[in-house]
Structure formats: C-alpha cells, structure tokens
Image (cartoon, grey):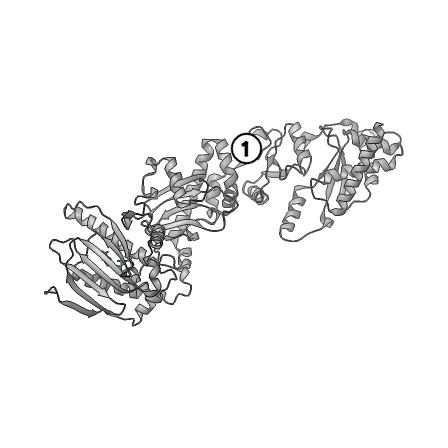
C-alpha cells in the first residue's frame, strides 16, 4: 500500500467454502471462548514484545496491560493490547494466511466429532473464533518497529477482507468485534467480567475491564513453594472455592522434568454436599483456564482433590479418549499419586494427633488407593492408622503387632460396631487386650486385602472366638461330678441345650472366663461371618441354614450358675426364661431382631423384672 487512502481488497485463500457458517454455528455450544482466544493472543503479543525488548535492547518501559471495553451504542466489543503489534504485511501473513488456514484445518478436523464436549482444550481456532459472535471484525494495529504505519483490517464474515493504512498513535493491537444480533449479551460488562474470571483469572498480564483489573496475574502456583505462607495457600483456596471450608492439606507441584507441570492440589474437608465422584481440578495451560472436568489427570481414588494444574505441554485440543490413553497423562497421574503418598507420610510423621484428625476425612481414599495402586500401597502402608481401644487411641499396624506380639502374634483383634460388640470390648479391656475399631464401610475389604498382602497376619473380630487370654484355666471343669460321671461343664451344656431347644447350627461350649460379668457369647468364626457378609453384599441371603455358631457359656457367671441350680431344683420355667434371655443378649451383637423376636425379647424382659421384683418383697 503506497497511498494511505488506498484500500486493499482481497480474498482469503479458501479450501472449505463454508468455513464461516461452520464457525458461526460453531462446534462448541459455548461461544464465550472467543474472548479467551483474543485475550490469549493479546498476552502472547505482549510476551513477544517483552522478548524482543530484551533481545534487541529496545528499552521499552511500558505498563503492559490488556484493556477490554464495550460500546453499547455501536454494538462493539474491543480487546486492546500494547504488545508487539502487526504491520500490514504481518496481518496478511498471520491473519489472512496462517490463522485462517489453521482455523480451517481445525474446523475440518473437529466438525465431524459428534459430542463437542468431548473436546477438552478448545484450542486451535484462535483469532477466527471471533466470528462465532461477530458479523464483522476489525483489527487496528501498529507494530513496535520504528516508524511502522498503522494497519486496519476488516472482514464481514465472508472470505473477502479489506486492508488499509491508518493513523494509530499507540503501539499494539485492537480487535473490534461488531457483535451479531443474537450475541448482544457480550455488551454487558457483568457478562464479560464473568467470562474473564472463568478463563483469564490467572493470566500473567493485567486485564482491565472499563479500567478495573479483573485478574490475578501472579497465581500462587507459579511462585516458589518456599516463599509461600500457609495463610496464602488457604486464601488462594478460598478464591478458587469460595463456599468451601478450609482445606485439610495441600501439595504444591513444580515439575520441569520429564514434563512441565505446575499446580496446587488441595485435599478438601469432605462435607455431605461434596460430590466425591466428580473431578474438581481446574486445568490451565500457561495460566489460561481450559477445563474443570478432566478426571483423566487425577488417579481415580484421588477424585476428591481440588485445586489447579497448569500443564503447558498437554496437547489440549484432543478428545477425551485420547487423554485417557495418552502416556504423558498416565505419568501425570503417577506423579500426583506419588506426591500425595509422600505428603501423607510427612503428615503422619509430623504429629500423630493432627494426622488423626485429617485421617478421618481421608482414610477411605487412602485405603481405596492402596487397594488400587501397588506403588501407593508400598509408600503409605506403614502410616495407615487405626483407632484402637488402647490408651494411645490411634495406632499403625506395625506398632500394634509389636505391642501385642507376646500375647497374640500376628493377630489383630477388631470390632466393627462398638455398640453391638461392647460386651466383648469390655472383656478385652478388662484383660488388658487391645482391639482395633474398624467401622468404616471400606474396612471389611481393606482387612481382607491386608491379609493377602501381608502373609501370616490375620484379623479377627472380637467375637469370632475366645482367645486363651480371656479364659481362666480351670482344672475343675475336667473333674467328674456325682454319680452320672459327667463333668460340671457337661452338665451346664446339657442343661442349656435342653432349655433352649433345638437351634440350627448351634454348638454349646462351656468355659470359665476371667470376666465373670459376661454370661454368654455367641461366637461366629471369622471365616463364616465374612462369607455371610460377602454374599449379603452381593445381594444374596443365605438364610440361617449355612450358619454354624457357638454359644459359649461362662460358668464363672452367677446367672449361669443360678440357671443350673434352678434346673436342678425343678424350676424349669424360670430357668428357661433366664436361659433364653442370656441367649438373646449374646445374639444381639450379631444381628438385629425381627419384629417377632423383639416382641419375645421384651415380653421376657418384663417377666424377668417381675420375677426380680417379687423376689425382693
Ligand atoms: N493481538 C495480537 N497482536 C499481535 N499479533 C497477533 C494478535 N492476535 C493475533 N496475532 C497474530 O495472528 C496469529 C494467529 O492468531 P491465532 O489466534 O489465529 O492463532 P495462534 O494464536 O497462533 O494460535 P492458537 O490457535 O493457539 O490461538 C498469531 O500467531 C499472531 O502472530
């Protein structure tokens, strides 16, 4: 263009006749991403200028910024930067040729993808995405080069463009969108602010809307972890998730090799509203927001993690299935799982009480992770803590085994329902025995898994059997009493078998327990109980037919003694009443009563109270 007034008219070289209608309809339902594309270009232009400034020693000392403004009367939205700018020649090259053909290629590639939400990055369309919302787009630009003339390009959404020289005083580029009729809501500053907050909140250059800076150009993740205070991490979390409680802990990633990955991951306090099945991580690419739905980046068992990841190397304009199979994404998952494991080890070693508080929130995920991921298992296995009935409240398995190895080597006793198994727990406590409390849903699977992983170690519920530690070695039981040549134990056994009548699967056993206060226990072997639980979980009910259990009677208990005496005195009915009651009480820790059993139990309880009451008179 030799003459300033001369307007160059031309046609953008075209292979796809209908590219503009396709762009207009666009592949994504969310047209709003045009703004991210334009602001990203503006950021790039500023970075380029900063670069040449250093290389060419230009000494430009400018306040770099991007200004966004709307003109409701003219129906325009303008994105203005003070970056490198373009000459008319550069516009021809970058906008008419390169940008256009790459937009064309991008449209070609993605126009046939059925589910547009499958495309994660939205990157690639670039400058031409402005035609999603505008009928006409103008560029006014002046290059940083000395004595460069201003250039004005315009295109009305056909393949023709106009290019002419203009007066433009300041360096940089303005992109002016004449919004189409249906897209006028982009004239509302509140709408623009909302989009900027979503996509551009952490871009590295100040972005102003009507003069106000809307973004945080130095997000925490780009700073060095050593210079960040805890309060700053919490404050940043509040910015990302304004309605959430403060996080439990966080991990700052700053990886350069073998790939670039920065970010801060937070483990949230889990509340009832928190959806643990949905991914909560915000993905950025060089500080540009990409998506908050990238479950592929996080190991499945860490889905509740929140925070942001900035992964500049990821090929983001790809489909979800590609991400699922991409080796680099797998490596990212491995790194995250490794870092979470290290953090757990650190926290566990720092302060047991504090760790115990966190543990209640995270243990399900940690246990699940250990079952899913061998490396994760190996790293954290010695830090897993369990609530225990011993003084120290929480213990690791190695600590438990070491403490108890004299009394029951390689065996862990546990309760999974403190209320139902209270009698047994009390007995354990009275005898100085320690039991773990494993009352979470996942625990029954987890202990099976631990037994498999750590051969020789077994878990046994407190009511699965009576350990020798609870039994009072009583020689008397072996002695024959009276003329019928039966031992005391045999007599109690026969008496109760008679009183209780035929009960399917029941074996009666008599022992002298050290604790005289417990009359009877129902013992269901660990194996049988687990088998029952498993089949129940699979939706099958085996019924009572399969059940083999032991009714253990404590002959040191005064009521058991009394029942035997009653029977010998011929007080058959009273003996039956008490015998049944003892049986039911022992049974209660294993199963809830049905309506009929409950009615029986209550009626019998009343009769016993009456009996005691009348005896008192
Ligand atoms: N504000 C701007 N200032 C200077 N040059 C620009 C500006 N906007 C666009 N350009 C030039 O136009 C080119 C094409 O832009 P376009 O947005 O289509 O693609 P891109 O930014 O290269 O890649 P992407 O597909 O990632 O957006 C840019 O590479 C740049 O050279």
Q: Quadrant of residue 467?
A: top right
Judge left or right: residue 305 versus residue 543. Answer: left
Q: Where is ligand 1, by quadrant?
A: bottom left
Task: Answer left or right for 104 relative to 514.
Answer: left
Furthest toward the bottom, the residue is 17
Helix, strand, or loop for circle 1?
strand
Residue 364 position, x and y percent, is 53, 43
In the figure, residue 225 lies in which quadrant? top left
Q: Quadrant of the N terminus?
A: bottom left
Residue 494 in sight:
no
Q: Give residue 31's position: percent from left, percent from top.
A: 35, 60
Residue marked by disc 1: 394
Instruction: Indicate the quadrant containing the C terminus: top left, top right, bottom left or bottom right.
Output: top right
Q: Is residue 525 above or below residue 513?
A: below
Q: Is residue 34 visible?
A: yes
Residue 69 picture location, percent across and down = 27, 54
- Residue situated in front as seen by the camera: 232 or 136: 136
Q: Nearer the viewer, residue 12 or 243?
A: 243
* Residue 44 position (above or below residue 586): below
* Residue 569 horizontal/vertical position (percent): 89, 32
Question: Disc count in the image?
Answer: 1
Residue occupying the point 34% across, 42% down: 220
Q: Does label 1 point to a residue whose CB lies under 8 Å from ligand 1?
A: no
Q: Report the side of 305 relative to 136 (left or right).
A: right
Between 464 and 585, the residue placed more toward the observer is: 585
Query: Crowdedness of circle 1 by 10 Å Cα count: few (<14), some, many (20+)?
Result: many
Q: Residue furthest front?
A: 73
Q: Which residue is pictured at 18% across the width and 65% down the height?
A: 163
């Amino acid at each position: 263009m030799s003459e300033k007034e001369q307007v160059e008219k031309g046609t953008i070289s075209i292979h796809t006749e209908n590219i503009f209608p396709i762009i207009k309809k666009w592949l994504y339902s969310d047209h709003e991403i045009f703004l991210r594309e334009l602001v990203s270009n503006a950021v790039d232009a500023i970075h380029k200028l900063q670069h040449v400034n250093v290389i060419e020693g230009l000494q430009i000392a400018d306040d770099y910024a991007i200004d966004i403004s709307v003109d409701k009367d003219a129906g325009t939205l303008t994105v203005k930067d003070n970056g490198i700018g373009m000459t008319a020649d550069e516009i021809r090259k970058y906008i008419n040729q390169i940008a256009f053909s790459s937009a064309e290629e991008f449209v070609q590639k993605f126009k046939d993808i059925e589910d547009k939400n499958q495309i994660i990055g939205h990157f690639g369309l670039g400058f031409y995405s402005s035609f999603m919302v505008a009928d006409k787009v103008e560029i006014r630009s002046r290059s940083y080069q000395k004595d460069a003339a201003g250039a004005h390009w315009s295109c009305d959404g056909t393949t023709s463009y106009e290019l002419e020289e203009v007066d433009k005083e300041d360096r940089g580029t303005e992109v002016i969108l004449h919004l189409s009729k249906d897209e006028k809501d982009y004239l509302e500053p509140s709408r623009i602010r909302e989009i900027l907050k979503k996509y551009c909140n952490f871009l590295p250059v100040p972005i102003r809307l009507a003069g106000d800076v809307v973004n945080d150009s130095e997000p925490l993740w780009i700073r060095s972890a050593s210079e960040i205070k805890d309060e700053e991490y919490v404050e940043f979390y509040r910015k990302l998730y304004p309605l959430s409680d403060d996080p439990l802990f966080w991990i700052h990633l700053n990886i350069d090799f073998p790939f670039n990955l920065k970010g801060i991951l937070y483990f949230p306090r889990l509340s009832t509203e928190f959806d643990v099945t949905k991914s909560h991580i915000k993905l950025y690419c060089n500080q540009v927001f990409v998506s908050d739905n990238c479950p592929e980046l996080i190991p499945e068992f860490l889905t509740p993690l929140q925070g942001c990841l900035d992964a500049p190397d990821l090929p983001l304009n790809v489909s979800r299935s590609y991400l699922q199979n991409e080796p680099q994404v797998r490596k990212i998952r491995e790194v995250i799982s490794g870092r979470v494991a290290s953090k757990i080890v650190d926290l566990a070693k720092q302060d047991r009480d504090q760790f115990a508080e966190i543990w209640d929130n995270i243990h399900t995920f940690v246990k699940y992770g250990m079952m899913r991921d061998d490396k994760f298992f190996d790293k954290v296995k010695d830090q897993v803590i369990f609530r225990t009935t011993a003084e120290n409240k929480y213990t690791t398995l190695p600590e438990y085994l070491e403490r108890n190895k004299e009394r029951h080597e390689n065996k862990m006793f546990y309760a999974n329902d403190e209320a139902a198994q209270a009698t047994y727990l009390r007995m354990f406590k009275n005898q100085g025995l320690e039991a773990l409390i494993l009352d979470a849903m996942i625990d029954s699977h987890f202990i099976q898994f631990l037994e498999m992983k750590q051969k020789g170690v077994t878990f046994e519920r407190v009511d699965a059997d009576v350990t020798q530690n609870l039994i009072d070695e009583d020689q008397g039981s072996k002695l024959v009493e009276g003329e019928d040549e039966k031992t005391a134990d045999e007599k109690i056994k026969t008496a109760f078998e008679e009183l209780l009548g035929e009960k399917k699967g029941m074996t009666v056993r008599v022992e002298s327990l050290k604790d005289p206060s417990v009359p009877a226990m129902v013992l269901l072997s660990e194996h049988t109980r687990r088998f029952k639980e498993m089949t129940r979980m699979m939706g099958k009910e085996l019924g009572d037919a399969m059940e083999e259990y032991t009714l253990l009677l404590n002959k040191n208990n005064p009521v058991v003694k009394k029942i035997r005496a009653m029977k010998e005195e011929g007080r058959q009915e009273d003996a039956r009443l008490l015998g049944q009651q003892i049986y039911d009480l022992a049974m209660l820790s294993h199963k809830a009563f049905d309506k009929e059993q409950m009615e029986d139990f209550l009626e019998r309880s009343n009769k016993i109270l009456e009996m005691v009451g009348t005896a008192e008179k």
